[in-house]
Amino acid sequence: MQIHLLRMKLNKIVTVVVYPILTILLITSCNQDKSGQVTATGVNEEDAYNAVLFSEDSIAQYPFLAERLNMIAETLKKTLPVLLCVDSLNENQKMAEQLAIKDPVFTKFLFDPETKKPFRNEVFGVYPARQSDMHGVKSNYNLATTYRIEMYNYALNNTAVALVDVQQQKVLHAYFLSQTQPDIPFYLRNLAVKIAVESPEVQKAMGVKPDEKAALMASTLTSLNRSRCERSRHLCVAPTFVKGEKALWAIVDLTDMRMVGIRWTHVGTAGKPQPLLTERRLQDDKITACYCEVEQP
């Protein structure tokens, strides 16, 4: 039994510690040593070879993030530690949001049950309710005065949903979607674009500081296909910048508020980047291009 437990611990160490370190060393070596020649002649292989991955401790500290970090810190000190929706809301939406964050079911996971420390929760959106949202509502309601509030829990990677009738001044129904990320608000979309635009690596790759308005797919969640964003359950998006027939993907981690990596891809026939590039795919493609397809002297 002890031997079995020891093997389990060793396997965990290899998976959690050794593999990530090996990957970083391989990528760093690839970035620094270009003495080998890539045997594959396709543009895709060259794009993978020139991709840039950032190590986990390379968090970019931009001045414009200070306001965001302070807002989070101050909110976590409050009795009700919920970051309210920063996007513009009308009076009814604000009322619906306030009613929701006072509901005990909607706010069930604001704190760690063991340590009692607050989790980071943020209201992402307050939307007019649709008829399809009302299947769990048992009481009478007026659809015209009912709103759907979505709150994301960064720690647990779940989404709390509340349906609020502002005319009745009450929460009609509240529930949770486990391992689910809602659509991000415009505020976070713009923050991700700002991080990408200010990144020296993005500017170097584009040859110029790109215009924030030129960013495409900035709200596209990229926590898919066994990427680190999925393994770590982080909220990641991919602002993309088109230059000629190619598109530069800039994967941004909104949980840690940092750049994850960048890579060029071909633009699709419709004039948009071909989905979907994740950190895992970027990582695998780069190692393949640098080592599996290289003739060493």
Image (spheres, rainbow, N blue to C red):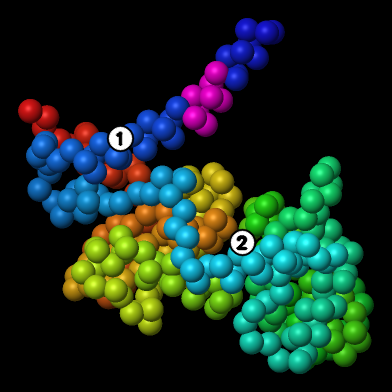
Q: Residues within 10 Å of mark 2 (few under 14, many from 20)?
A: many
Q: Is mark 2 on a helix, strand or loop?
A: loop
Give the answer, above or below, for where 211 lies relative to 7.
Answer: below
Marks 1 and 2, how far apart in space? 32 Å
**Left or right: 101 in relation to 267:** right
For this rendering, which residue is in front, 88 or 63? 63
Give the image location of residue 53, x and y in percent.
Answer: 35, 49
Does the magenta-highlighted stretch encompass residue 50?
Answer: no
For this rendering, which residue is in front, 288 or 91? 91
**Left or right: 242 in relation to 110:** left
Q: Which mark is residue 181?
A: 2
The magenta region covers 10-17
Give the residue type that dot 1 points to.
Leu
Q: Are marks 1 and 2 in contact (CB under 8 Å)?
A: no
Camera sees residue 184: no
Give the answer, above or below, for where 40 lies relative to 170.
Answer: above
Report which quarter residue 218 is drawn in: bottom left
The residue that appears at 37% across and 35% down in the rendered structure is: 23
The residue that appears at 52% across and 60% down in the rendered structure is: 257
Give the image location of residue 99, x and y in percent.
Answer: 85, 78
Give the residue type that dot 2 points to.
Gln
Q: Name the residue under label 1.
A: 26
**Left or right: 256 in relation to 49:** right
The residue that appears at 60% across and 20% down in the rendered structure is: 9
Q: Is mark 1 on a helix, strand or loop?
A: helix
Main SS category, magenta section = helix
| Nearest to viewer (mark 1 / mark 2) | 1
The residue that appears at 76% across and 92% down in the rendered structure is: 91
Give the answer, above or below, for where 165 lies relative to 269.
Answer: below
Report which quarter residue 88 is drawn in: bottom right
**Left or right: 177 in relation to 191:** right
